[in-house]
Amino acid sequence: MGFYFHEKLFEFLGILLLPKLKYNNLIKQGETKMVGAIIGASIGALAVGIVVGFFIFNAVQKKRMGDAQNQAKKLVEDAKAEASSMKKEALLEAKEEALKLKNENDNDIRERRAEVQRMENRLVQREEALDRKEDLLDKKIQSAEDIKAQIENQKNELLNQEKELEKKAESISKELERVSGLSKENAKAELVASIEDEARKDAGVIVRDIENQAREEGEKKAREIVTLAIQKCATDQTSEVTVTSVALPNDEMKGRIIGREGRNIRAIEAATGVDLIIDDTPEAIILSSFDPIRREVARLTLEKLITDGRIHPTRVEDIVEKVKKDIEKTIKEAGENATFEAGIFNLHPELIKILGRLKYRTSYGQNVLKHSLETAYIAGALAGELGADVQIAKRGGLLHDIGKALDFEMEGTHVSIGVEVAKKYKESPEVIHCIEAHHGGVEYHSLEAILVQVADAISSSRPGARRESLDAYVKRLEKLEEIANSFKGVQTSYAIQAGREIRIAVKPEVVDDSGMVVLANEIAKKIESELEYPGQIKVNIIRETRASATAT
């Protein structure tokens, strides 16, 4: 605004100064007489122009101020109108939201009221049901009291009848004592002895007949099944123990294996976990360890070291690591081959590896992996003959001793370890039950479990399958004879056929022919309960009566 005022002022000054320029021109032309009049007129015009410009400027300013005020009033009015409109919209939205919340609250209240009503109805129904049950219970209590009263009456009647019978029996007993000339106790003893003797004879005859019939029918069928099963599992058996002998090319190799100050042998024992026994045995070293896998690693390591000729601690460590990898590969291949031969698939890979470890595990000199395969073959054959599930029987037979692969590392019996491993790798409950029950630790729930137990016994009792230590063998024979000699009437006993049969000589005046059958069964039951043995033990009783006379 100030700039605009100055601009207009300069325009007026320019207009007023124009006569001055003309004045200068008049001086040059010599028109001196008009100078004074022009100057006066110019000054007057200048004053008038300033006054007029001032008033014009004020008028313009007032107009502009008026326009600005009008515009501001319009803006204020527009803002007020807009604010009023927004206020109305906000009020409408608030009312709508309040109405919505009210409707939701009303719906919630109605639902809660309905739920409360339903609960009240259920409570009423329950109270009615309880009332009905209470009435029924009262009726039952009353009925029970009536029955109790009847029982008491019957009991009293029976007591009275019993007293009457006792009186009659006493009178009859006295009459019998008078007629027979025997006292009550003597007559009772003779009667009991007579009945017992007859019962023994009858029992012996019945047992003998049952045994003969069962033997004729059972042995024929069992012989067919067992023969067929054994035919299908005719595999070679190897004898493996807790020690392994490694042949040396010469006795000088012993010194090289020992090394300077024994560093080589210490490195071998530390890397393999196996004890090396170097004694006077010519051209041989003994490896001793309960872990058959470690023993095999040590054996292969020594053979490679002897072949290579470079024997020092660093070389020992390298060969041990290489042999361990080869053993792991061999274990996996053994497990895969076993499953393939048994016709069992879909086993967990880790379970196959554990199964392969049984290749290096023995039980009484019998290779456990081969024993497991035999058990699978036999169980499958028996299941096929009897109409059971062949796959379950074979799978249970193959895995029944899986715990023996880990019993060096885990606590517990091989049965409990096997059950735990089978559960870990998602085996079926039927297979787990076969593993759990193959030693009779739990009650049998399936035919397949019984067949696995039978197949296990057949495989382990086969001649040549297992080997016992001399001490265990002698103790078992002594225990067998001790059990037989513990019975009344036994004169002597002899364990023969490597403990597969026991012959017992009885006193003829104590044990009669019928009592022999009963005595044989009693001895067999006691052997089953007290003695652990593979296969079967036959009990034979001999009763001999001799008479002699001398002629003179």
Image (tube, helix red, strand yellow):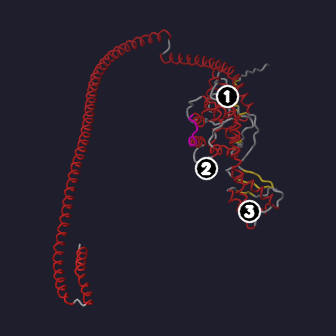
Question: In the rendered image, which residue does mark 1 sit on?
Answer: 382
For residue 76, which quarter of the picture? Answer: bottom left
Question: In the rendered image, which residue does mark 2 sit on?
Answer: 409
Kind of element beneath mark 2: loop
Instruction: Name the residue type under label 3.
Output: Arg
Question: In the rendered image, which residue does mark 3 sit on?
Answer: 315
Image position, residue 72 (x, y; %)? 20, 61
Give the residues drawn in magenta, as a range: 423-429
In the image, is residue 5 part of the stretch drawn in magenta?
Answer: no
Contact check, label 3 and label 2, Cβ < 8 Å: no
Instruction: Name the residue type under label 2.
Output: Glu
Instruction: Name the residue type under label 1.
Output: Leu
Q: Say which of 505 and 406 sits in front.
A: 406
- Specify whether 184 is left or right of 465: left
What count of labels does the image hold?
Answer: 3
- Specify whether 300 is left or right of 388: right
Of the residues under marks 2 and 1, which one precedes in the sequence?
1
Contact check, label 1 and label 3, Cβ < 8 Å: no
Image position, residue 285 (x, y; %)? 77, 56
Kind of element beneath mark 1: helix
